[in-house]
Image: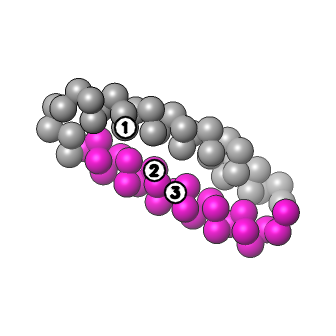
Amino acid sequence: MDASKIAEMDELIRRMRQCAEELKEKDNGIQAVERNVDRILANIKMLELNISDVKELV
């Protein structure tokens, strides 16, 4: 896979994490939002393991 594509995906993943964390800060105690953001962050972590962490190897 092209290293530039991996770098682009890494940046998108970083932005997704920032957005999810910002949303979590503004959940105003709404449990549904809090739980869903936690799930989103777990999925982002999987993306980080798959893409961001191997970026160094490419």
CA separation in Å, label 1 and label 2: 10 Å
Asked whether disc 2 touches disc 3, contact meaning CB atoms under 8 Å apart, the reply is yes
Residue 24 inside the magenta-drawn segment: yes
Q: Are marks 1 and 2 in contact (CB under 8 Å)?
A: no
Q: Is residue 30 above or below residue 44?
A: above
Q: Which quadrant of the figure has residue 29? A: top left
Q: Nearer the viewer, mark 3 or mark 1?
A: 1
How far is the residue under mark 2 from the one under mark 3? 5 Å
Three-letter residue code for mark 1? Val
Element type at marker 3? helix
The type of residue carrying mark 2 is Arg
Q: Earlier in the sequence, mark 3 or mark 1?
A: 3
Q: Which residue is mark 3?
A: 14
Q: Which residue is mark 1?
A: 37
Whole-number angstrom distance, CA of label 3 to CA of label 1? 15 Å
Q: Residue at x 67, y 41 (%)?
A: 49
Determine the main secondary structure of the stretch shown in magenta: helix
Magenta segment boundaries in residue numbering: 1-25
